[in-house]
């Protein structure tokens, strides 16, 4: 699915008339109402990722939540849904009908479910990986433009990788001994490139983690980092130096930190809002 759907259109267009499930990793685009609501976010449009909520302290296992995926609150949980949100007959996922009926109560009291758009996770971060070579020397007034581009992790230029930042990780061919015979697959993702979002793991003493933001594992927490990863004097992200030094130990055993790209969270959902009533 390459386009956005309304919630009402989504199940029929994507999975047929029998389906009533929003899978983890789907993206919701939610317009803010006017005048601005002080209990909501200041951005005119908000992006959320449907995530498996268990790593964020949810009970029971399998319930979903919404993680903020755009703006200055990116990387924080917005809501964890109750067990009633589970689709009938499933132990995971989010019921489309339940979400529509309970939108104002659980998500946005002044918003309308009819104005919400949804998109599958596979295309969440199909953005050009254009690295900016001159962002550190650019003037402050020009920096917002250059900050929208990707930069390598090793030349990031900041001591902190803030929550909400996106890490784009190219897959590498593992050594032969890294084959996992117990499951007969490589112990990494099958995609050529994996995108992660830095999240605030609220139930883990202020530590950060990486949530998968692309591919069929989107919406799952990949790793929660130890206390040593917390930047000195700033618990709202990851120490860049620590992450580089511990990349192979904590993230990707046969990957290289030099090949990782970083992008600021503000532009995560700058994609054309093209609605479709049928599957392309």
Image (spheres, rainbow, N blue to C red):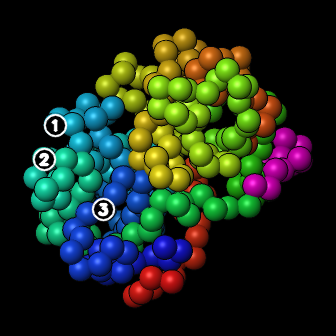
Q: Earlier in the sequence, mark 1 or mark 2?
A: 1
Give the residues drawn in magenta, as a range: 129-140
Q: Is residue 107 left or right of residue 206?
A: left
Above or below: residue 109 compared with residue 141: below
User: In front: 82, or 121?
Assistant: 121
Q: Which residue is mark 3?
A: 22
The quadrant in which residue 114 appears is: bottom left
Q: Which residue is mark 1?
A: 60
The quadrant in which residue 8 appears is: bottom left
Across and down, in percent, residue 277 comes to 40, 88
| Pointers 1 and 2 in contact (C-beta within 8 Å) | yes
Q: CA distance from mark 1 to mark 2?
A: 7 Å
Q: CA distance from mark 2 to mark 3?
A: 14 Å
Q: CA distance from mark 1 to mark 3?
A: 18 Å
Query: How crowded is the residue under tag 3: few (<14 C-alpha within 10 Å), some, or many (20+)?
Result: many
Residue 135 is inside the magenta segment: yes
Q: Which residue is mark 2?
A: 83
Q: Secondary structure at mark 1?
A: loop
Across and down, in percent, residue 162 comes to 57, 35
Q: Earlier in the sequence, mark 2 or mark 3?
A: 3
The quadrant in which residue 52 appears is: top left
Label number found at residue 256: none
Q: Is residue 185 left or right of residue 200?
A: right
For the question of whether residue 258 can be seen, the reply is yes
């Amino acid at each position: 699915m390459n386009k956005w759907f309304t919630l009402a259109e989504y199940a029929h267009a994507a999975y047929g008339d029998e389906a009533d499930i929003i899978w983890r990793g789907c993206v919701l685009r939610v317009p803010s109402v006017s005048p601005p609501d002080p209990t909501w976010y200041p951005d005119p449009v908000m992006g959320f990722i449907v995530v498996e909520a268990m790593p964020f302290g949810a009970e029971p296992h399998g319930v979903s939540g919404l993680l903020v995926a755009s703006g200055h609150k990116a990387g924080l949980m917005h809501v964890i849904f109750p067990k009633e949100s589970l689709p009938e007959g499933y132990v995971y996922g989010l019921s489309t009908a339940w979400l529509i009926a309970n939108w104002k109560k659980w998500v946005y009291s002044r918003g309308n479910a009819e104005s919400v758009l949804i998109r599958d996770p596979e295309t969440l971060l199909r953005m050009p990986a254009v690295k900016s070579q001159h962002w550190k020397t650019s003037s402050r007034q020009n920096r917002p433009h250059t900050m929208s581009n990707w930069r390598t992790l090793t030349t990031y230029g900041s001591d902190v990788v803030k929550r909400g930042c996106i890490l784009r990780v190219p897959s590498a061919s593992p050594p032969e001994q890294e084959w996992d015979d117990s499951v007969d697959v490589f112990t990494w993702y099958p995609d050529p490139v994996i995108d992660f979002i830095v999240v605030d793991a609220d139930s883990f003493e202020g530590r950060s983690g990486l949530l998968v933001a692309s591919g069929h594992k989107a919406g799952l927490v990949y790793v929660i980092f130890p206390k040593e990863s917390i930047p000195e004097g700033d618990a709202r992200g990851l120490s860049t130096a620590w992450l580089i030094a511990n990349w192979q130990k904590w993230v990707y055993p046969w990957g290289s930190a030099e090949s990782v790209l970083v992008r600021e969270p503000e532009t995560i959902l700058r994609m054309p809002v093209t609605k479709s009533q049928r599957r392309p």
